[in-house]
Amino acid sequence: MNDERTDPWSHDWPPADPPSPKEPDALDLDDFLDADSAGLAAPAAPPAPVRRFCRTCGTVVDDFTGICPRCEPSQEELDARPPRREDAPSIASSLGLYFAVLGTILIGAISIRFGAPEAKTTCLISAVMSVVVLLWVVGSWKTVSPCLTTVPAAKWFIIAALGGGATYLLAMGMMVMLAKVLQLPEVDEVGPMMEGGLSLPVIFLLLSVQPPIFEELAFRGIIQPAMMHYMSVRDAIIVSSLLFMVLHLMPLSFPHLFVIGLSLGYLRHKTGSLYPCILLHFVHNTLVLLTDMP
Amino acid sequence: MAEVQCPHCGGANLYDAAFCEACGKALPTGHGPRIVKDSELATTSAGRSVQQLELAKTMKKAFGALLAVAIIQVIATVLISFAGNDPRVDKKALQTVLIVMGGIGAGFFVLAIWARSSPLPAAVVGLVVYVSLHLISGILDPTTLYQGLLIKIIVVAVLIQAIQAGIQHRKLVQEMGD
């Protein structure tokens, strides 16, 4: 028996497009010959479709369309389905953003280790990181634009500014405590930059302006909404905070970085805007800068 | 593509058919009703619940991977702590290393526990932290990149699989909610 009929069901299941009602007419003469030689009820004219039972579940298929009522959605059902929302960036894309930023930081760290001038390299890392984040912002503009066009009530900005103060106090407390317990020298970011010949306004840009804007765009603007697409709000805030924490590569600062991340994530969720987050981050970083200034 | 002949009526069926298309009787092909591929979503309620179970199983593998990382990390911490007996080792530096390493181990334990209730977020965080840690240690000392390479590949592969299953699971749940 040589049944070489063309079967629309042979490759893709469920079918991307349900077959047109013309399908049963597409049988050729061989089918009838085969059906006869197999001793089946010979299909008389008008020809009945050969496919009378679903090969997946054994249910009797629709005589006319050949569609299984159990396994394959009808055209009406397909039409009734809302289109899948694919606006949010995928998890893969947000992980790509994270690793692109991490890669930039690590390449900078290697260069400094191998003798590149520290001050200039730091500026360069900031610039490259900003460009990387901007590329992703353009790529997922649909997700980012709502948090840039939304401006929340003034009370949220007050809360954010106070929150920045609170996280600063927490961070300082943690660092002082850890430094005492572990007898470590306190971390000083500003000193090496000053020695590297950077002026105060440049340091201000590098520590207080660039990180709040671009880290918030990345973590609260892209990664958090992407995660929210696939998990609960609570989990999305936790995940984006943990990524934010790890990216800073300072294990001793992890506890307070996580708390800052959670506050920022909560603000972003409550206000639907990035501006309070940027403000909180700015207040925090500026207070740290003022503390570290000689 | 091989075809299967129906033992009841002799009709030719596609190799992956579970039932004869001509007479509707079960075929002895041995692979039962067709399972949908990874990239597809089941359309029947029965298929959906089967697929959901499968995806949940894959997601739960994240728990095993994260727990394995935690245990390896704790063993490494304990081994390094023995270095404290060596008088040449700087005690303060060792203390910091131990706190960081022990903290990472504890963190992976927490992630493993979290993976039991929320496998997708735990797997995402676990993957990112694991890869970041090894990138950083690889930069500080390139020879560490090749240490335990097989374990690293397995952990990363299991976590990526768990994330993919989690995404698929989410889509399936959304589809079922529609």
Image (cartoon, coloured by chain):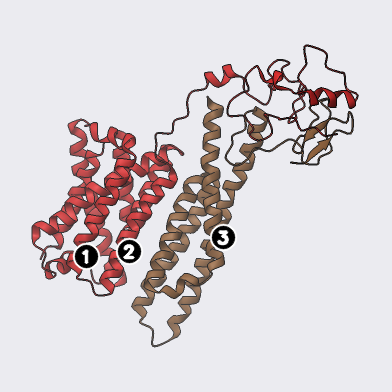
Chain colours: A red, B brown
Distance of label 3 from label 2 (alpha carbons) = 24 Å
Which residue is outermost to the top?
A46
Quarter holding the C terminus of chain A? bottom left
Residue B154: which disc? 3
Residue displayed at 24% across by 35% down: A148
Q: Which residue is mark 2?
A: A106
Position of residue A259 measured from the top left corner of the image (x, y, whole percent):
32, 50
User: Number of labelled discs?
Assistant: 3
Which secondary structure lies at badge 2? helix
Q: Chain of mark 3?
A: B
Distance of label 1 from label 3 (alpha carbons) = 36 Å
Q: Say whether mark 2 and mark 1 are on the same chain.
A: yes
Question: In which quarter of the view is residue A51 placed?
Answer: top right
Q: Chain of mark 2?
A: A
Seen in the picture, residue A77 relative to A104 is either above or below; the reply is above
Position of residue A285 measured from the top left corner of the image (x, y, whole percent):
19, 53
Residue A72: which disc? none
Q: Which residue is mark 1?
A: A121
- Disc 3 marks which amino acid? Ile
